[in-house]
Amino acid sequence: MTNPAKRPIIVNGAGPVGLTMACELARHGVDFRIFDKNAEAATQSRALAIFPRTLEVFSTIGILDEVLAEGQRLVALSLNSDERQLARMSFENIDSPYRFALALPQYRTERILEGRLNTLGGVVERDMEMVTMEQDAECVQAQYRRTVAANETVEGSWLLGCDGAHSAARHLLGVSFQGAQYDEEFLLADVKVESDLPTDEGHLYFAKEGVFAYFPFRAGRGRIIADQRPGATHAGAEPTMDEVQEIVRRRCYHPMQISDPVWKAWFHISHRIVERYGKGRVFLAGDAAHIHSPAGGQGMNTGIQDAFNLAWKVALVAQGLATPALLDSYQSERLPVARSVVNLTDRMTRTATAQHGAIQHLRNLLVPILTGIPFVKEAMAERLAEVTIDYRGGAWVENHGFGPVHAGDRAPDVVFYDRAARTEKRLFELLRTPGFLLLIFEGFEGVNAGGELLGDLPGNVYRVARPGQEMSPGLLEDRDCEGRTAYGAGEQGLLVLIRPDGHIGFRGENSAALSDYIARLRGSAK
């Protein structure tokens, strides 16, 4: 057999998760093939919300400007009931350059991602349905069925299953998908909307008949979501516009006229999660690993961040630059996140769709009380924004000392000044270069070693000058000590190694400890 590293990595599924995975593999310079069973790209979508952490991911991938140009910014979520506003949850205080959510139909997000993939030299191979899969210690073999051409057997070094809730990869891998379907049926419609409601907010209504949500898109259009009581079933029939308008009239106390539907459907939702994120040379991501209620809009965002977490790891291992043991951290880091999201969205769904009058009354009483407490309100906004997810305590993050951030945390964005280029540089801009980012905050007694510490790991090293220090070429100036404060650099200086996914891998003062960490990552530790 050939060297596994010479085989391409197989990405099965070309939704937003698979396309993110492929873009990242391309950026990190490894061979791959991406397949999708559909002959054409999607033209319908259920997911719509892109939250701040995912916008940061899109900035790294290189599609942020296009996404922002097409999406509708939502700066807050308005919660309403009984012809009054219960609460208004804003993103204005979250720790991100992007203090808003973005409403954009999923198929348009996919189109932008696929365009970026094409720019990076990748192409989606469509009309390719995986029907069998086998693996051994060296490779994965998958057979694909095509409707207009001969079947093909593809051999890959790894297979990354990003193929949705009915994942063939998960089924063929034999991983259980535990959970259940909700009793309620849900309505979804993309329509033209005439209303005086603010178009820079999402709107949620707790009505006695059920929940109703409206999320504005651009050009006067929007997404409508509503539940139908348990027992009601439409046997796959498409809702009529009269049915949709009647739900709007009964549940939204603001006047709203709808027309010109692009898509409308009844559907059921479930909450399920895998027992494990992979086995051998096969890994699962996105809806293939976890599905949940659309409450909170977390599904697509969580899946995209699965891909962002896994792609760089499998790329390094495929290139022989990291130990295969690094891949174990994909499950240990992402499975707890998925469990948390499933639990959160389940609680949100059951709260929003409560049928008993006393429970509805208690909900409507508690919502304004809880959201009236500033730290509770901000914590809820940060949870939705997904900027507080961390991987602390994992086997592949290493922290020394105390400070405002810890290894495993998402790296805070700060602004440095590049005197040579005479321009400011945000940390998130530096992360757009594939690989690791080593920040060396200079100490007050000599200069930290570290320029050579990365060895052959891909990435960049930046020395960060302390206030008042003479600037030499290649140093970034930390004006107003923003970086030192955010990362907790003291008089001895600080070494911060940021992983390709924007999380801190190592934080400490000792260059020897950093060398040991990198040697362990490389698989060359003694």
Image: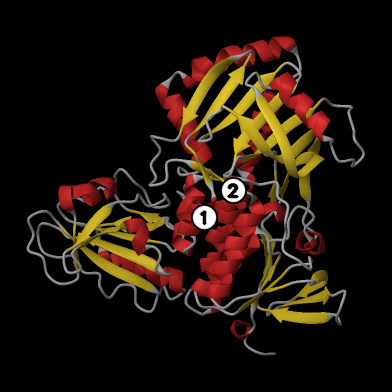
- Residue beneath label 2, please? 104
For the residue marked with disc 2, what is the amino acid?
Leu
Q: Residue at point 81% right, 64% down?
A: 172
**Direction from residue 303 to residue 491 in the image, left or right:** left
- The disc placed on residue 67 is 1
* Residue that extends furthest to the right in the rendered view of this protein: 235
Residue located at (72% from left, 59% from top): 42
Residue 491 higher or lower than 121, as above or below: above
Among the two numbered marks 1 and 2 on one chain, the one whose residue lies closer to the N terminus:
1
Occupied quadrant, residue 304: bottom right
Count how many numbered circles sit on residues in the image.
2
Q: Position of residue 218 (x, y in %)?
A: 57, 44
> Residue 237, position in %: x, y?
90, 40
Q: Does the rendering let one see residue 442?
A: yes
Q: Nearer the viewer, residue 375 or 220?
A: 220
Q: Quarter of the image containing the C terminus?
A: bottom left
Would residue 10 be found to the left or right of residue 385 on screen? Answer: right
| In the rendered image, the vertical position of residue 449 relative to residue 43, given as above or below | below
Q: Kindly identify the amino acid type of the residue bearing the numbered disc 1.
A: Val
Which is more toward the observer, 467 or 508?
467
What colouring method underlies this structural image? Answer: secondary structure
Residue 297, horizontal then vertical, whole percent: 61, 41
488, 380: nearer the viewer: 380
Q: Are marks 1 and 2 in contact (CB under 8 Å)?
A: yes
Which residue lies at the image location 69% right of the left edge and 77% below the top edge? 137
Q: Is residue 447 left or right of residue 156?
A: left
Query: Which type of secondary structure does the marked residue at label 2 adopt?
Result: loop
Where's residue 2, x and y in %?
Answer: 66, 90
Please rate how many residues cluster around mark 2, counting C-alpha atoms within 10 Å: few if below 14, some from 14 to 19, many from 20.
many
Q: Secondary structure at mark 1?
A: helix
